[in-house]
Amino acid sequence: MNEVIKTINNLRSIRKFSEEIINDDKLKIILNSAIRAANASSMQSYSMIVVKEREIMKSLTGYTGSVAIVYCVDYFRYLKLAEYLDHSYDVFDIISFITGTIDTILAAQTSVIAAKSMDIDSLITNGVNRMGLDNAFEILNLPEKGCFPLITVIFGYSNEKSKKKHGRLNDSSIIHYNKYSKLTEENIRTLVETYNNYDNPLGLINNWEELGLKNYLDWLFTRWLGSNNLNSTNDGLKSFYDILKKIGFLKYSNFKM
Ligand SMILES: Cc1cc2nc3c(=O)[nH]c(=O)nc-3n(C[C@H](O)[C@H](O)[C@H](O)COP(=O)(O)O)c2cc1C
């Protein structure tokens, strides 16, 4: 196995970091790696905001580490460039948002891999959604148009001893050849059992039986997706849509709350 594949195989989410600081040379490598990711129309439709203050990380995401990078979908730069050159550019819509999201996520994941290759661990988190998007706009002084704090990565040195690798689905329900193969009832039964396998945990918890549930997926659908998910609370969903609308990405949408 070559070193890159080994690095990718060793990726895991770390939630407790030591006090050790990532030095600026390594931070620069992480940032420079991120910008090497492919990006649509060569527009790099993202910005990366580096946060070193632990208190700010905490109030933004609920987590702390040595450094946090907030990866924002960002077209504000182009808005300003177009304005300066007297072009009528304001094509923010849901397609721009999706395209910018792809650019942003590729940059984020590339930096996660670069960090791991230097023994720096990380946690990808959407904690900003839980802590409040308005809060993030204020703390980070985000522009009023075209910029959305999509995802944060907390980087640091792990304080979790010999963290076990989290399982993954790796079967025909995930990987298809030539065409999509729809799940049979047998496949579905197998999947439910795969999620129930304590020896290869795929999910977020392992005590669903203690909680009176037969299957892990019963917990996922009723407890996790039922209560914790942003989409399940009208307020969370409304704030998400309101902000997307305000910054210009829902221009052509008929969405009504
Ligand atoms: C979009 C996204 C958001 C996530 N948000 C959180 C989070 O807020 N808190 C957390 O503990 N883990 C978060 N994670 C990490 C996942 O829980 C983790 O990747 C998954 O459980 C698999 O574990 P592993 O990365 O260690 O293999 C997030 C991952 C992604 C991709």
Image (cartoon, grey):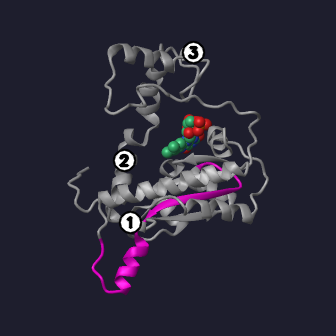
Q: Position of residue 242 (x, y in %)?
A: 34, 57
Q: Earlier in the sequence, mark 1 or mark 2?
A: 1
Q: Is residue 70 magenta?
A: yes
> Which of the labelled discs sits on residue 210, or is there none?
3
Q: Which residue is mark 2?
A: 237
Q: Residue at x 43, y 67 (%)?
A: 42
**Height in image: 208 above or below 97?**
above
* Residue that sits furthest to the right in the current view: 20
Residue 115 lies in magenta, yes or no?
A: no
> Dividing the picture into quarters, in which one does residue 100 lie?
bottom left
**Residue that carries the numbered disc 1 in the rendered image:** 41
Q: 10 Å neighbourhood of mark 2: few (<14), some, or many (≥20)?
A: some
| Amino acid type, callout 2 | Leu
Gap in Å between the C-alphas at discs 1 and 2?
30 Å
Indicate the quadrant of ligand 1 in the picture.
Answer: top right
Range of residues picked out in magenta: 62-90
Q: Is residue 192 left or right of residue 14?
A: left
